[in-house]
Amino acid sequence: PDRGLMKRAYRIAAPTLALWGESDKVIPPVYGVEFTRLIPNCRHRIIKEAGHMLMYEQQAGFCDAVKRFLKN
């Protein structure tokens, strides 16, 4: 549920990466799409074959996404 992020997201000034597991059952990927729409300068990436703990489930994909984001 929204805890006020929708009203405050526009204030985020830092470049942001929204990573989501394709099979996340805790916070569905549609939230990532919405956060990307609301947060200025936000990129969104879905990690395949991962759920809510994508950094553990798909370590290589997670690290690759973060490295690419930080390079740019």
Image (cartoon, helix red, strand yellow):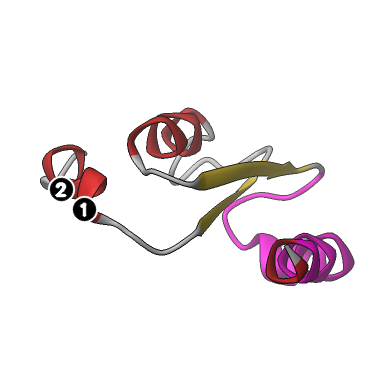
- Asked if the residue at tag 2 contacts the one at tag 1, i.e. Cβ–Cβ closer than 8 Å, the answer is yes
Q: Residue 11 got which mark?
A: 1
- Where residue 12 sits: x, y (%)? 29, 57
Residue at 33% across, 35% down: 38
Q: CA distance from mark 1 to mark 2?
A: 6 Å
Identified at 60% across, 42% down, the residue is 44
Q: Residue type at mark 2: give it.
A: Arg
Q: Which residues are the magenta region? A: 49-68
| Residue extending farthest right | 60
Lateral position of residue 59 relative to residue 26, left or right = right
Residue type at mark 1: give it.
Arg
- The label on residue 8 is 2
Task: Answer with left or right where residue 48 lies relative to residue 20.
Answer: right
User: Is the stretch drawn in magenta largely helix, strand or loop?
Assistant: helix
Question: Residue 71: image x %, image y %?
Answer: 77, 70
Q: In front: mark 1 or mark 2?
A: 1
Specify whether residue 12 is painted magenta.
no
User: Residue at horizontal 49%, vertical 30%?
Assistant: 33
